[in-house]
Image (spheres, coloured by chain):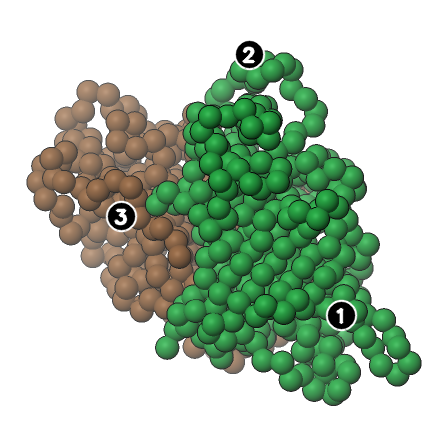
Chain colours: A green, B brown
């Protein structure tokens, strides 16, 4: 039905150091070069240096299309970069990055953190659907061109309610229709962060029409670097990443949410949900939805000590605490930073750092 | 924000017969070759012969990414094929075709034929939304791998309510955010037919969840050939194609719907709707939704002399005429044919001819 196979043969072991390891350790990024798909680069673990992957593959989609052929070669290069053994390594600069996949054939965003949806329903005054805990809410989002991690958010109107959503995402290999949760989890090739830019006023309108968020979700931005699950070590457990996601808005840290414990559906489950009635092609991006930690009750008052990863949540918190939302959505000049530190204190994916500018008049 | 430009310079006139014509006449298809994106071929006007475009470009996406560079060269080849002046032309075989774009970065399907939505609402017993005539209902559909025109429909379950939708679609170039209807219409590069395969039972479920059709729309199939608007001559007028779309189900002609007069939103309007809050990348596919012609009143009885282009419509007609729907959705072994004849009686896009088989157990 779909080829799904490259015309190349399998990796024959002669290009790398030995047979294919079952584990793959590497960090990948895509540098801007004026083309639509950019240039693939391998980035060191500490994000200090990088090396063009030109001799191996030019684009990340090319690698995903034939992962077993390319990934051992990229891993060899990665080891050399980490060991400082390459002559042509250069200082890694996230500002020169496109999204790791600058455009993709599929971007599905699921709502794995039910706390986020609970807040959204609280803000709208609606009930959580009965099926919320049984199956994820998921939508097909636009994937024809993403924002790089430091690209500004432009061309929008303030009255559309410009918001951010600090989100996790994975990139898959080929997923046959009807795959199990476990097989879907095995299909995860790369993990990254996303800012799922959202237009709250437009979403409210689109939801009345019944065909999804469509125009309420403009272009998503992704972290500088995409990382293999193995590279994440024991922070990656059974389809969940156990670290903290930091959101900083206009220089103020507004959220430090744990990504592991409250992720109701793990990535294997999110992928399997999508693949129930159709295959997913290599390079499909699956999101967790906005990362969110539930509040705690302190007497009469509800508190959210972990903060928030989207302004809609902040507004819901205000409405629940004081009867009305008072924080405005983003305006021209607003800045935003989304980052995640590893257990060693270093950024894992590099930071998403964006400014809202050049609004439409 | 997005490059949108190739690193190549503009077409310099030395490869073709002269300066770039403002009109582009050609028919393109993609042959299966075991790869994910297939091999681009140029097809003669009468669909009898074809020629690999290998010397010019390997994939249709490559051409769309740099249309002004490649299209004059492809047009030259097309003229040679039509004149019988090529040595390596071969007999065109739709069964060897993938979708013209075997995978795409975006597939947005809008509901331009309000008659179809009226029937769907009649079947569900719901009202048309008040905004129906003001803005199209549109959803983001999966584009990570399409079915070729003669690929079987497999892997589905009968209880999901397997249906077809005879649909028109266009492929765009780059569309800046906020483009006018006219500019959007100018962005149309190619026109084709689609079978927007639909799972009615799944759609009913997904619609209760509010995030769009998602799993209710499995993989879409497209016609063998994509055709430039200029090639369609005066049948293409102001964003609407004025011909008849034939649907044949299990060998019985069930629909012969006019595509022009009842298309409430033309393709320029559909594209502009999508581009209101975001740019669209080159190679975005925009659909018209199921082509449908409204019925006529004959005394007490409503009749639909043009037939139907989806079983859901047939069921709605039955419910309106006789109080209940009686036609079942598709089963294993069912066949389907969607075709459109030009004013000369020849197929314009080649036929979509599919069989439902290998259902999931």
Residue at image location 43% in from the left, 66% down from the top: A154
The x and y percentages for residue A322 are 75, 87
Question: Can residue A249 be seen here?
Answer: yes
The image shows residue A361, relative to residue A238, as above or below, that is: below
Q: Chain of mark 1?
A: A
Residue under circle 3?
B228
Find residue B19 and report its horizontal and vertical position in percent. 10, 44
* Labels 3 and 2 in the same subunit: no
- In this rendering, position of residue A90 left or right of residue B192: right
For mark 2, what is the residue? A14
- Residue B86 in the image, given as x and y percentages of width and height: 18, 24
Q: Chain of mark 2?
A: A
Same chain under badges 1 and 2? The reply is yes
Q: Looking at the image, how many numbered discs can be counted on the residues?
A: 3
Q: With B191 as the anchor, is B77 left or right in this view?
A: left
Q: Nearer the viewer, mark 1 or mark 3?
A: 1
Q: Nearer the viewer, residue A39 or B122?
A: A39
**Residue visible at 67% across and 59% down?**
A246
Label 2: few (<14), some or many (≥20) within 10 Å? few
Q: Is residue B310 above or below residue B135?
A: above
- Label 1 sits on a secondary structure element that is helix
Residue B354, image x, y percentages: 50, 39
Quick one: A26 or B143, which is closer to the camera?
A26
């Amino acid at each position: 039905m779909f080829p799904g196979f490259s015309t190349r043969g399998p990796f024959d072991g002669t290009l790398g150091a030995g047979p294919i390891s079952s584990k793959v350790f590497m960090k990948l990024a895509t540098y801007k070069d004026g083309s639509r798909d950019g240039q693939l680069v391998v980035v060191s673990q500490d994000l200090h240096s990088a090396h063009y992957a030109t001799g191996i593959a030019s684009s990340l989609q090319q690698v995903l299309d034939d992962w077993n052929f390319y990934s051992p070669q990229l891993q060899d290069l990665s080891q050399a970069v980490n060991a400082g053994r390459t002559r042509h390594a250069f200082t890694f600069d996230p500002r020169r990055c496109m999204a790791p996949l600058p455009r993709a054939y599929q971007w599905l965003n699921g709502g794995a953190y039910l706390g986020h949806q609970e807040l959204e329903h609280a803000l709208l005054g609606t009930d959580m659907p009965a099926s919320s805990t049984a199956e994820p809410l998921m939508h097909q989002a636009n994937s024809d061109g993403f924002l790089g991690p430091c690209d500004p958010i432009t061309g929008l109107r303030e009255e559309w309610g410009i918001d951010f959503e600090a989100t996790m995402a994975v990139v898959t290999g080929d997923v046959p229709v009807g795959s199990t949760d476990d097989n879907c989890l095995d299909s995860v090739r790369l993990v990254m962060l996303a800012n799922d830019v959202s237009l709250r006023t437009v979403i409210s309108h689109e939801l009345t029409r019944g065909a999804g968020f469509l125009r309420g979700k403009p272009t998503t931005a992704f972290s500088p670097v995409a990382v293999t699950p193995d590279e994440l070590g024991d922070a990656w457990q059974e389809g969940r990443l156990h670290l903290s996601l930091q959101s900083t808005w206009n220089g103020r840290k507004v959220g430090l949410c744990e990504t592991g414990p409250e992720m109701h559906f793990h990535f294997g489950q999110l992928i399997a949900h999508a693949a129930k009635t159709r295959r997913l092609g290599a390079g499909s991006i699956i999101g967790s939805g906005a990362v969110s930690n539930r509040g705690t009750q302190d007497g009469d008052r509800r508190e959210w000590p972990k903060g928030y990863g989207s302004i809609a949540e902040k507004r819901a918190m205000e409405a629940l605490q004081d009867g009305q939302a008072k924080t405005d959505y983003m305006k021209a000049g607003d800045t935003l930073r989304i980052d995640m530190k590893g257990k060693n204190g270093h950024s894992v994916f590099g930071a998403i750092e964006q400014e809202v500018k050049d609004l439409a008049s």
